[in-house]
Amino acid sequence: MSGVMALGRLEIVRSLRNRRVMFFTILYPAMLFLLSAGSVKGKNVPGTDIPYVDYFLVAYASFGVIAASMNNNAMRISQERKEGWIRQLRLTALPSYGYVVSKIAASLLVVIPAIVVTFLLGTTQGVKLTGEEWVSAFLVIWLGSLAFTALGIAIGYGVPQDAVQPVTLIIYVAGSFLGGQFFAVSGTLETIGKALPTYWVREIATQVISGQPISWGGVAILAAWVVGCAILAAVMYQKRAED
Amino acid sequence: MSNERLVGGPEVPAVSFEQVSKHYGQVQAVRELSLQLPQGRAIAFLGPNGAGKSTSMEILLGLKHASSGRVEVFGKSPRQAMTAGHVGAMLQSGGLPADVTVRELLTLMTQLHPKPLKVDEVLLRANIADLADRRAGKLSGGQTQRVRFAIAIAGDSDLIVLDEPTTGMDVENRHIFWNSMKGEAERGKTVLFATHYLEEADQIADQVVVINKGRLLANGSVSDIKAMAGFQKIAFRLPGVTREQLLNLPHVVSLEVLHDHVQIQTSDSDKTFYALLDQGLRPMEIEISALGLEQAFVAITERDNGDAVETTETEDAR
């Protein structure tokens, strides 16, 4: 297990050192949050009594989390497969699951600043939540990141190297669009969005900070994404074992 | 060589292949390869491109599974041997993450082995102390190779497997690298390396394994391999000599005449040379020697390829 931790530690160092990762994880969502929050001061999400600022708080925190967990893992795994780094790791005493476990563990830490920075900015934009609400929202987004990490791992292993970047970007942008990360979706867009983890991470986190009942159906869909992607990632990992 | 390093006693081979085959669809990469490599030696693994060297190495490292046959490393399965820390390896491709320093990388590698060396010791042995704080992405090709060698020895493993470790290195770097390899062998490690540079095998190896077309062709000391080729070389100077004068000499395999200098490859140097004298020729600066490893290697693989062509033809005829 110490080997897995050692690798996880290095994974974290590498992510924090990577300017592209830090930009898409922290800076970009934070900027978008400030811009959006400024334009909706005092307004509520149409048809609800949820302040639009609260909505964007959760939306952009989760947007950063998607980049940190899905994009980062997909691109890095695909790169490391190509370079032969994964093979090199298989020539050590590291257990075969060690690589993937260290990626998951590192992701759980790397997404934290994405959430915390947006939350801190939120307090400057008039978001007022109880301590319990802050913590619950954090936990929902944080645990929800597992779905994107698993998806990123599956893409990294399953998609051919040269297609990984476009595929990831399309899923990142389309998933965030339909999930309501950029603005509140309705109608057909929302119907499609309700099948996606981007939608439910944001929706459930919004529910816990606005005193609404939690949609357990949504929790189930989110859990199904985590499990489904984890299985897909495991299958892809096996398939690529002799690469 | 210290015997205390031997794993499970000297009678346990470092590597044992029994009737190992590996095919990819129709392509037979390794054919019924049986081979035992003793502990504590430097062993060169020779063969032309596509001979099955890399595949055999990947099988013994547990990266690929044999289609049939049995592979043991120190009496264990390849994966068990790896997990027990018996094996360190450097493959042909093995990219390093560009964004970490050499020291960070080696620290990680020591943490991934059960009984590692100290990082500073690894840096020293691989001759890369000056690179410790460089990012892996900023290294030259030769430097990267040396760092990858450091990774292979970081676990203080009993068997070190190197697949064409000096490919792309300049002569100076290659010689530095050979010293590191020799150092590991002198510490009693089993060093198994595939190479294209026969000088490398000649310099470092106690034992040479030659494979061709996935089969074992020869396994012995460097001088065994040279003897196996069965040819010797006669070289001399003879002013005014012509090719025609030498064509009827017995046992000649090949003949080269360049100005006054003659080189003959022969299957019986004594008889060829006596016949030369019997013709009344009196050559000067005579050298009679065994073939170099390179020529021996070419001779035995070519002979094998020739045989194979005949075999295929007989098969076609049936």
Image: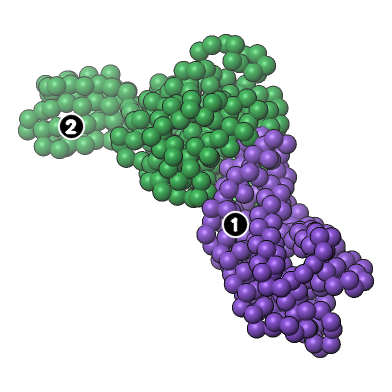
Chain colours: A purple, B green
- The chain under label 2 reads B
A207 relative to B206 in the view: left or right: right
Note whether B92 is above or below A152 in the view shown. above
Q: Nearer the viewer, mark 2 or mark 1?
A: 1
Note whether B310 is above or below A47 in the view shown. above
Q: Which of B41 and B224 is in front in this view?
A: B41
For residue A53, which numbered disc appears in the image? none
Q: What residue type is labelled 2?
A: Val
Label 2 close to label 1 by CB (< 8 Å): no
Q: Residue at x 71, y 59 (%)?
A: A149
Q: Which amino acid does label 1 sit on?
A: Arg
Q: x, y (%) of residue B41?
A: 51, 20
Distance of label 2 from label 1 (alpha carbons): 60 Å
Residue A44 visible, this angle:
yes
Picture quadrant of residue A191: bottom right
A215 relative to B211 in the view: left or right: right
A193 relative to A17 in the view: left or right: right
Q: x, y (%) of residue A214?
A: 90, 69
Q: x, y (%) of residue A151?
A: 72, 63
For residue A76, which numbered disc appears in the image? 1
Q: Mark 2 = which residue?
A: B262
